[in-house]
Amino acid sequence: MKKTILILLGAFTALFSLESFELGKRRDGTDPGHTGSPGDSLKTCIVCHGGVKEWQPNWITSNIPETGFEPGKTYTITATNTNPGYNIFGFQVSPQDKEGKLLGEIILTNTNETKLVGNNKYITYTSFGVDGQNSKSWSFDWKAPDASVNEVTFYGAFNSNMDGHKFSDKTTVSNLRVFKQGFTSIAEKVSTFSEWKFYRSFGSNQINISGLTTESGDLTITMYTLEGKQIWGKSALVQTGANHFTENIELATSGIYLFTLSLNGKQLSKKVYIP
């Protein structure tokens, strides 16, 4: 009996030491490649912390104007983790294309609370940048890429904790999509695309896509999850006027999806609930 107790005590001590080591390690930033982006194989904080991830819009914001970013110009990006009742916060953000390539340059503006990892591809927290009450924000600068890049997505994963143990952790993902100045704007969206609708035919996997274009050309339609994973796409030659497509798209779950239309350098993105 005594031997059994000693064995159990030793196992508990080893487990506690391992967990304490991991907590200490994670308190000073996270390893590269956990933003939830397609290029990061959708990996997030749950790889280490467990649980499930939730989606929240607008946790990544910027001072980039609605008209788009200028190549080579520097802007301020802010990542905010908000969870009432929590007091320990972490994050990782990276500006990427859909293949995972770093776009632009991340520039630290607060070296006390943030740092770069993964050959400067990712920004994450330091041990001095985790404490907060209900929320925590981190800001950094971003130098926009050259004129060959038309769009950039800032992918981010966030983790919240209230007692120092991973069992109470909460993981959230968010992203910010921005476009080059002149590539897309509100005026271009309105003039090129109008009355576009996306809906499922009742009792089937058929997704109906329809709308008007004021230009002809090669139209690309892409469908993503809110985490940025592409689940369907097609290209079709369209003429000016009405367009309609009926596609058989099998979805794992109902929910909100992002549809993107691209035509002659103009782009429209729309979030749609598919039941």
Image (cartoon, helix red, strand yellow):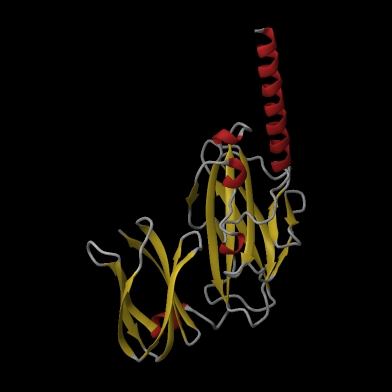
Occupied quadrant, residue 59: bottom right
In the image, residue 91 sits, relative to residue 216, either above or below, namely above
- Residue 255: image location, x then y, percent: 37, 57
Q: Is residue 153 left or right of residue 248?
A: right
**Residue 213 visible in this rendered orientation of the protein:** yes
At x 70% / y 38%, what residue is drawn?
22
Q: Is residue 47 left or right of residue 268?
A: right
Of the 4 image quadrants, the one containing the N terminus is top right
- Residue 80: image location, x then y, percent: 58, 52
Q: Total of numbered circles in the picture?
A: 0
In the image, residue 181 sits, relative to residue 119, either above or below, namely below
At x 69% / y 17%, what residue is drawn?
7
Q: Is residue 202 left or right of residue 120?
A: left
**Residue 222 visible in this rendered orientation of the protein:** no
> Toward the viewer: 89 or 232?
232
Q: Residue furthest top?
A: 1
- Residue 269: image location, x then y, percent: 44, 72
